[in-house]
Amino acid sequence: MQVEPSTVTPSVTLLGPQRRPTLDRVLTSLGVEGQIAAVTAGWQEREAEDAELMALLGGRGVNLRLHARWMDVLAQDAEYARAEREHTTVLDELQQLYLVQLDHAARATYEIAQRVDGHPRTKATVLEDALEVMRVIDTTHLTRVRELHDAFYAAWPPHGRTSTCTSSFPAARSARARACSTGTTMSSMANTASTGARTSWIHARALARTASSSTVAP
């Protein structure tokens, strides 16, 4: 039976690393019923290596194979594939330069945090300045990535390409429809440009907390 959109309450449950899987128990505790759409596109070429995931989903999982579908689109559309490769090359270069900036900023922040001499309040102020530099690097990087994506998709709108409309994966379409009707989607975390920025900020804040806890106020 089709579920009306108004009756579906979207929610996100973050499980964390699954070296010791908890997915099956979490699904049981949440009372998830019906088939479950799985997105493993972040694994790229290993997208189909989902036997363990499917077992944890109790035979109810359907892999949408988004990466394979995207590769199918690129195979059908050489012009778009060439533009997409150039776009990816630019993003990769931007990511590498961002990491160079971040590495220097992180080293400086770490060195400041590890200092044991000098005035504690001066150290705390300068440490916060160093963290602000990391914030600026992260924010600027995310802005540049968004600008590149916006420019690319404005010039090459994928929804306007014949290849994206004719790519056929019946099982994926069926699973997508079922996922919408049940309001349930379990997805893997794909590698995105923002991941590095968020991670660096988390590490920086942890470093600052460590330094603060070891600083004795005058």
Image (tube, rainbow, N blue to C red):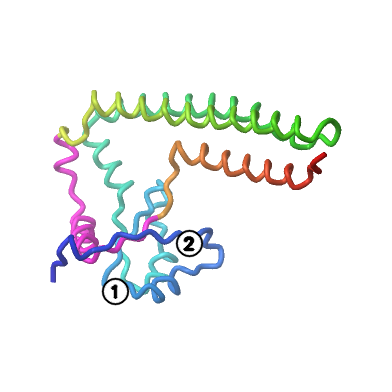
Q: Which residue is mark 2?
A: 15
Residue 37 at x, y percent in the picture: 30, 61
Please, is residue 35 above or below residue 48 in the view? below
The secondary structure that most of the magenta stretch takes on is helix
Residue 168 at x, y percent in the picture: 18, 49
Helix or strand or loop: what does disc 2 sit on?
loop
**As rendered, which of 111 and 92 lies closer to the eye?**
111
**As rendered, which of 215 and 52 lies closer to the eye?**
215
Left or right relative to 119: residue 8: left
**Residue in view at x 45 percent, y 43 percent:** 191
Whether residue 112 is visible, yes or no, is yes
**Residue in view at x 73 percent, y 43 percent:** 212
Q: Where, quadrant-wise, is the C terminus in this rendering?
A: top right
Image disc number at residue 33? 1
Which quarter of the figure has residue 155?
A: top left
What segment is highlighted magenta in the picture?
162-187
Left or right relative to 141: residue 112: right
Left or right relative to 44: residue 5: left
Helix or strand or loop: what does disc 1 sit on?
loop
**Residue in view at x 21 percent, y 52 percent:** 169
